[in-house]
Amino acid sequence: MNPPQIYTERTLGIVKPDAMDKVVEIEDIILRNGFTILQKRKVHLSPEQASDFYVEHYGKMFFPSLVAYMSSAPITVFVLAKNKSIASWRELIGPTNPFKARETHPGCLRDTYGKDQTRNAVHGSDSFHSAEREIRFMFHDSIVEPIAVGQATKDY
Ligand code: RTP
Ligand code: MG
């Protein structure tokens, strides 16, 4: 008889360029909040890859600055697992705008590490569908042998 299989929800977390100097601190917060880190990778996206990743925002006013920012320097991407990880990670990172986050979710990651509306320190998938797409995008859908997107500057 096969052992029962238990699935835990996965999500994609990113430490964005402006918060890369705090990645160790942020990883510690991730673990203290009960997430398991299934995969981790440091990558430097090209502008084309950053555009593809954030394609849902194509045409919006902030799209060019978002793409320039996300391709400006390396980022660290995490596959995180936890019960209801998608909502739980979004709760931990807080609202998009760090100034708003400061008022409504004091102590959230964007309050603590965000600089402004673009440079807001962290990313979190917003649904099951985007989590699976984003994990595939960053890790080529392989849980064992992640394939870096763009220029991998370091493997962990
Ligand atoms: P993310 O996708 O990065 O987790 O952020 P989010 O869901 O909270 O916000 P979203 O609407 O998906 O926006 C994606 C990223 O675009 C930048 N942004 N800039 N008005 C602006 O200047 C503006 N609005 C959004 C942020 O970096 C945001 O996280
Ligand atoms: Mg989003």
Image (tube, rainbow, N blue to C red):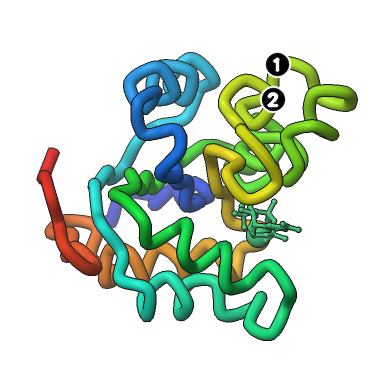
Q: With 130 as the anchor, is 4 left or right in this view?
A: left
The residue under the point 70% across, 16% down is 107
Residue at numbered disc 2: 111
Q: Which mark is residue 129?
A: none
Residue at numbered disc 1: 107
Q: Nearer the viewer, residue 54 or 147?
A: 54
The residue under the point 57% across, 26% down is 113
Amino acid type at mark 2: Asp
Q: Nearer the viewer, residue 142 or 122?
A: 122
Residue farthest toward the right in the current orientation of the protein: 104
Q: With 88 as the anchor, is 64 left or right in this view?
A: left
Amino acid type at mark 1: Gly
Q: Quadrant of residue 80?
A: top left
Where does residue 3 sit, x and y in percent of width and height? Answer: 31, 49
Quadrant holding ligand 1?
Answer: bottom right
The residue under the point 33% across, 21% down is 24
